[in-house]
Image: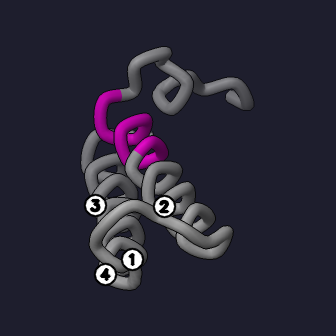
Amino acid sequence: MNIRQRLIVGALWIGVGAVMAITIEPGIPSTASEFLKLFVVLLALFIAGVYLFDPWNVISRQRFH
């Protein structure tokens, strides 16, 4: 996966996290659904970070060539 594709996918995951973050009420989460929404936001940002920074070289590794 080249850098342009990684930037596009990372930006899409940041967008997913941003859309989910809009649905979270400000303050400390008190219900299970709010905790789940917070988890989804953090997971989307983590996946975006993996695509953007590729810290363990898992995205740029080409296994099937």
User: For mark 3, what is the residue?
Assistant: 11
Which amino acid lies under the numbered mark 1 shown in the image of this protein?
Ile
Marks 1/2 in contact by CB < 8 Å: the verdict is yes
Name the element at disc 2: helix
Write the residue at 40% across / 19% down: 55
In the rendered view, how is the structure colored? Answer: one colour
Indicate which label's residue lies in the foreground, 1 or 4.
1
User: For mark 1, what is the residue?
Assistant: 24
Which amino acid lies under the numbered mark 4 shown in the image of this protein?
Ile
Q: Work out how far the residue at label 2 is from the one at label 3, CA to CA, in angstroms.
A: 19 Å
Q: In this image, 57 relative to 24: left or right?
A: right
Marks 1/4 in contact by CB < 8 Å: the verdict is yes
User: For mark 2, what is the residue?
Assistant: 38
Q: In this image, 33 relative to 4: left or right?
A: right
Name the element at disc 3: helix
Q: Work out how far the residue at label 2 is from the one at label 4, CA to CA, in angstroms.
A: 11 Å
Which amino acid lies under the numbered mark 3 shown in the image of this protein?
Ala
Q: Work out how far the residue at label 1 is from the one at label 2, CA to CA, in angstroms.
A: 7 Å
Q: Which mark is residue 22?
A: 4
When the figure is inspected, residue 45 is found, relative to residue 3, above or below; the finding is below
Q: Earlier in the sequence, mark 3 or mark 1?
A: 3
Q: Earlier in the sequence, mark 2 or mark 3?
A: 3
Give the overall secondary structure of the magenta segment: helix
What span is in magenta? 46-53
Quadrant of the rendered image containing residue 24: bottom left
Foreground pick, 22 / 54:
22
